[in-house]
Image: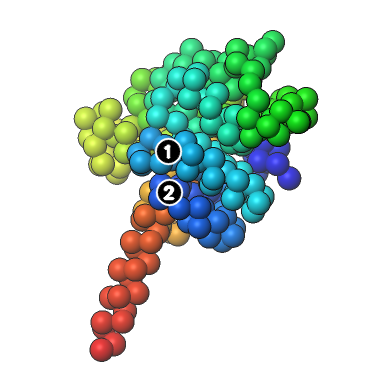
């Protein structure tokens, strides 16, 4: 089943983040069973050519590749969609207008304003009409709620047609409230709950990025009602596993 249809049914999906620029990283994580993977161009040094290679690998694993952008610029959205991304994750969406701009940049006219070109997504020109239909049926647009301004406008943002899901960026959200990294600060927790309640009320799937790979934290967020959850990222999973194994090894020596 395609990711877009899972989101439309509010089914639980769990993904993760890829920041390291080797296709094997994406391949290993996809084979592990994540429902989707985010190729993060915002907080990494990934280049577009590397992103396309990883999209190709993830296509082979039948794992949707969502590209986290550096901004809501239509030229950037056009290029990653032309590379074959299953969708985009748009940072710092603060208003309904921001969300609408993302939708306009993903879709061709008459629904949107995306420029028409021939690249990998369109079968290098051989499957343009098929891609047009795929785009309408399967493209995924995720807005990142990571600023207190977005929390204050959450109902209007999530009501924009074409927005498939939201995800809370807890670190930037806490930073926008003057409490960077203080995720358990009461006002930060209250803002997260406000977003969760809005998503539930509007029937919009969403969740939060559980940055540290902590299964108990993931379970708490699932129990709280989130159903689109990011779990860890390649560098944190690698770091915690390596450190944990070495602690165990040294303890037995």
How far from the left and from the top, in percent, is residue 52? 54, 40
Extreme residue toward the left, this view = 178
Circle 2 SS class: loop
Q: Is residue 207 left or right of residue 191?
A: right
Check the image and report above or below for 1 versus 146. Answer: below
Q: Which residue is mark 1?
A: 47
Q: For the image shown, how many numbered marks are present on the structure?
A: 2
Sooner in the amino-acid sequence: mark 2 or mark 1: 2
Q: Nearer the viewer, residue 148 or 239?
A: 239
Mark 2 packing: few (<14 Cα in 10 Å), some, or many (20+)? some
Does 58 appear above or below 245?
above
Q: Residue at x 64, y 34 (%)?
A: 120
Residue 11 visible: yes
Q: Which of the image's four quarters has the C terminus?
A: bottom left
| Residue at image point 33% right, 61% down | 239
**Relative to the observer, which residue lies in front, 197 or 213?**
213
Q: Identify the residue at horizontal 47%, vertical 28% (top origin).
A: 90
Residue at the image position 76 percent from the left and 31 percent from the top = 127
Classify residue 65 by image quadrant: top right
Say which mark, if any, is on residue 21. 2
In the rendered image, residue 252, in percent from the top left (x then y), is placed at 29, 87
For the residue carrying disc 1, how many other residues have a C-alpha within 10 Å: few (<14), some (14-19), or many (20+)?
few
The answer to whether residue 220 is seen in the rendering is no
- Give x and y (percent) for residue 88: 53, 32
Mark 1 and mark 2 in contact (Cβ < 8 Å)?
Answer: yes
**Depth check: 184 or 232 in front?**
232
| 33 or 154: nearer the viewer | 33
User: How far is the residue under mark 2 from the one under mark 1?
Assistant: 8 Å
Relative to 98, 126 lies left or right: right
Instruction: Tell me the quarter of the image containing the N terminus.
Output: top right
């Amino acid at each position: 089943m395609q990711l877009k249809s899972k989101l439309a049914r509010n089914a639980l999906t769990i993904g993760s983040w890829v920041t390291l620029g080797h296709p094997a990283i994406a391949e290993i994580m996809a084979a592990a069973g994540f429902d989707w993977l985010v190729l993060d161009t915002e907080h990494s040094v990934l280049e577009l050519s590397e992103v396309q290679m990883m999209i190709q690998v993830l296509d082979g694993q039948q794992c949707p590749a969502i590209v986290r952008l550096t901004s809501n610029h239509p030229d950037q959205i056009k290029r990653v969609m032309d590379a074959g991304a299953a969708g985009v994750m748009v940072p710092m969406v603060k208003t309904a207008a921001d969300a609408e701009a993302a939708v306009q940049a993903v879709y061709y006219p008459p629904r949107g304003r995306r420029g028409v070109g021939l690249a990998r997504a369109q079968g290098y020109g051989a499957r343009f009409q098929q891609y047009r239909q795929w785009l309408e049926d399967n493209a995924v647009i995720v807005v990142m709620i990571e600023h207190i301004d977005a929390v204050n406008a959450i109902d209007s943002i999530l009501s924009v047609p074409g927005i498939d899901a939201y995800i809370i960026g807890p670190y930037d959200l806490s930073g926008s409230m003057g409490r960077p990294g203080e995720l358990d600060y009461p006002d930060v927790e209250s803002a997260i709950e406000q977003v969760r309640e809005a998503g539930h009320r509007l029937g919009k799937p969403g969740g939060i990025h559980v940055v540290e790979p902590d299964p108990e934290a993931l379970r708490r967020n699932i129990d709280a009602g989130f159903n689109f959850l990011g779990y860890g990222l390649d560098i944190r999973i690698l770091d915690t596993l390596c450190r944990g194994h070495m602690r165990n090894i040294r303890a037995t020596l």
